[in-house]
Image (tube, grey):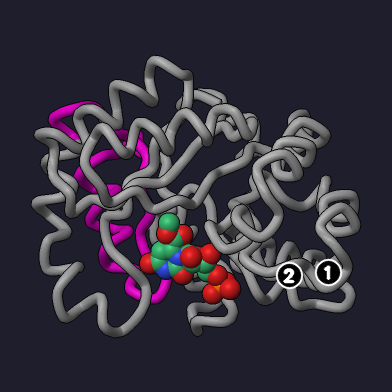
Amino acid sequence: VNLSGFIKFREQSPLIIAVDVEPEISIEGLLEQAKNYVAGVKFGLPYILRKGASEIKRITYRYRDNYFFIADIKLADIGFVGGLMIDLVKEMGFNAFIAHGFIGLEGALKEIKKKADELGLFLFVVAAMSHPGAEEIFNRNFISIVEACKKISIDGYVAPATLPRYIRELRDLNPNAVIISPGVGAQGARVGDGISSGATFEIVGRRITLSRDPLVTLRELMSIYKDRGVI
Ligand code: O7M
């Protein structure tokens, strides 16, 4: 998936499912049911490690026409080690991955972006986080992170629906960005808070994965998006 490739998926849905735990109805049960309601699937590191690389690869290949897949590895290391992780991400069949913004460009994000481009992977950088403690340290660096990313043409970002001012500011700073926004559901942001602030996709995890009837949950989410006029 490249930048323009996201448009097709956005027409399908504004939703990305965050899979950090085994879904209540199993991963394949969920991915079969969610096809018409969800654009992308983000696998968290705990889930990737628990399942193992070959099982993740089997899933991404089986559903590659239905969803884009994001490896949420939150890279925060030197470029060399980041590169080793990115090779694994590619082997597992992901389309995109996530790196932290605070690691800076030289020796880190620059090398990571170069490697992502070489392998045809889309890079999302965390620009601000969703939990209360993020305001203590991380989010104070928001502007520096976005300005650094712009210098090397990074156009993918993670920004919180719980603190939507960051999404609005990011959208102003980079009108073409693909912004994915967590915090909806379990963390308290309302469905549509991210999209109405300028996010491209909202990330919803436990509200879907822990649901005994995710189809009902997904239909509820879609009707809220429609009521709020965001789709
Ligand atoms: O809906 P939840 O709370 O069950 O899941 C939220 C997901 O978003 C979960 O996978 C987190 O790892 C992720 N996330 C945050 O919750 N807050 C952040 O600030 C950033 C992320 C994220 O996706 O970072 C890449």
Label 2 lies in ligand 1 vicinity (Cβ under 8 Å): yes
Looking at the image, which residue is at 63% across and 34% down? Answer: 92
Is residue 104 found left or right of 68 in the rendered image? left
Which range of residues does the magenta coloring cover?
Answer: 150-177
In the image, is residue 172 part of the stretch drawn in magenta? yes
Q: Which residue is mark 1?
A: 214
191 vs 103: above or below? below
Q: Residue at the top extreme?
A: 118
The span from disc 1 to disc 2 (Cα, nearest Å) is: 7 Å
Label 1 lies in ligand 1 vicinity (Cβ under 8 Å): no
What is the three-letter code of the residue carrying label 2? Thr
Q: Position of residue 171 (x, y in %)?
A: 30, 48
Q: Position of residue 3 (x, y in %)?
A: 46, 27
Q: Which residue is mark 2?
A: 209
Q: Can I make out residue 25 in this image?
A: yes
Label 2: which secondary element: helix
Looking at the rendering, which quadrant does residue 137 occupy?
bottom left
99 vs 79: above or below? below
Of circles 1 and 2, the one toward us is 2
